């Protein structure tokens, strides 16, 4: 494969991240090559498990149609999540009141909150609650901790439901940190679970600023429940830079993208 060919394949993958699917006819027009050449590129990318060919084009691979358990998520892309969590923690300032959503990425924020002063942390995550308690008992965290109670999801170590939503509505926060299962331009941010999604929406409503933590595997995916449009998000923190094709869209929506290096 020539350098030009590899660049074209990269273009196709970037377009998938933007739109979730590509059409052979559109690629022929954009890349100024024959339909046979496009089909060859798509075949090669499918062999590399980077997309799935369908009639008239291709779609992004999305094998995960349901949310993995907390334990499985905890070991998946652990290093990327650590970098994202560390970058997110730098946005927390002394005296902040913050919501920390459930998720193994937001959980990575906890070790980096040690030197913050006079924090109030509210969470729906049982794992985050446990970590905060442990840090406080060891005098490594000096802030206040509030647990948003409700129906317990034992598989994902979190609370959900109407009771949790009612309790969340009683508080206001400076910043809300949430994790997602999919993000796509035009489709917004999405999640697997509707109950968890409704609670995340309530946390966002009650906060001055919404910060999304996501690794690159969520790009181009649309899951069952829509949490928010991109215009409702203030900051996105990821393990990679924003795809070039997304930059103008994000700027138009006033979304700041932070690359966690």
Image: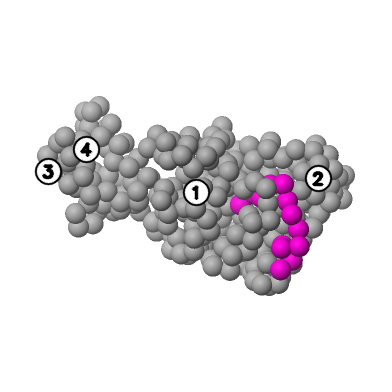
What's the residue at 18%, 39% (across, down)? 29
What's the residue at 67%, 48% (across, down)? 208
**Tags 3 and 1 touching, CB below 8 Å:** no
Residue mark closest to the camera, 3 vs 1: 1
Per the image, label 3 sits on a secondary structure element best described as helix
Query: Label 3 belongs to which residue?
Result: 36
> How many angstroms separate mark 3 from mark 4 (CA)?
14 Å
Per the image, label 4 sits on a secondary structure element best described as helix
Identify the disc placed on residue 126. Answer: none
Identify the disc placed on residue 119. Answer: 2
Q: Which of marks 1 and 2 is nearer the N terminus?
A: 2
Residue mark closest to the camera, 3 vs 4: 4
What's the residue at 58%, 68% (across, down)? 195
Per the image, label 2 sits on a secondary structure element best described as loop
Mark 3 is surrounded, within 10 Å at the Cα level, by few (under 14), some (14 to 19) or many (20 or more) other residues, namely: few
> How many angstroms separate mark 1 from mark 4 (CA)?
26 Å
Question: What's drawn in magenta, residue-wise?
Answer: 166-178
Mark 2 is surrounded, within 10 Å at the Cα level, by few (under 14), some (14 to 19) or many (20 or more) other residues, namely: many
Q: Quadrant of the N terminus?
A: top left
Q: Is residue 176 magenta?
A: yes
Q: Earlier in the sequence, mark 3 or mark 4?
A: 4
Query: Label 4 belongs to which residue?
Result: 30
> How many angstroms separate mark 1 from mark 2 (CA)?
28 Å
**Would residue 102 be seen by someone viewing this image from the given angle?**
no
**Tags 1 and 4 touching, CB below 8 Å:** no
Query: Label 1 belongs to which residue?
Result: 230
Using the rendered view, name the quadrant where residue 243 is placed: top left
Q: Does the magenta stretch include residue 91?
A: no
Going by the image, does 8 lie left or right of 105? left
- From the top left corner, tell me how far across and down residue 97 is, in percent: 76, 48
Q: Earlier in the sequence, mark 4 or mark 2?
A: 4
In the image, 136 versus 174, the foreground residue is 174
């Amino acid at each position: 494969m020539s350098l030009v060919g590899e660049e074209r394949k990269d273009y196709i993958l970037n377009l998938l991240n933007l739109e979730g699917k590509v059409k052979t006819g559109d690629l022929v027009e954009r890349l100024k090559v024959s339909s046979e050449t496009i089909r060859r590129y798509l075949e090669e990318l499918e062999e590399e498990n980077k997309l799935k060919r369908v009639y008239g084009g291709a779609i992004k691979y999305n094998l995960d149609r349901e949310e993995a358990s907390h334990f499985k998520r905890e070991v998946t892309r652990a290093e990327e999540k650590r970098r994202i969590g560390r970058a997110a923690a730098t946005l927390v300032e002394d005296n902040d009141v913050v919501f920390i959503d459930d998720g193994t990425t937001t959980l990575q924020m906890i070790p980096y909150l040690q030197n913050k002063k006079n924090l109030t942390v509210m969470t729906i995550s049982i794992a985050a609650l446990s970590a905060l308690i442990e840090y406080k008992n060891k005098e490594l965290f000096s802030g206040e901790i509030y647990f948003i109670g409700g129906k317990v999801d034992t598989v994902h170590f979190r609370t959900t439901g109407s009771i949790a939503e009612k309790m969340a509505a009683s508080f206001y926060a400076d910043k809300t940190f949430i994790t997602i299962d999919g993000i796509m331009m035009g489709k917004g941010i999405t999640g697997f679970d509707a109950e968890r999604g409704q609670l995340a929406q309530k946390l966002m409503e009650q906060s001055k600023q919404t910060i999304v933590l996501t690794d690159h595997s969520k790009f181009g995916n649309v899951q069952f429940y829509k949490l928010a449009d991109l215009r409702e998000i203030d900051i996105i923190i990821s393990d990679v830079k924003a795809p070039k094709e997304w930059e103008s869209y994000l700027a138009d929506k006033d979304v700041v993208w932070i690359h966690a290096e």
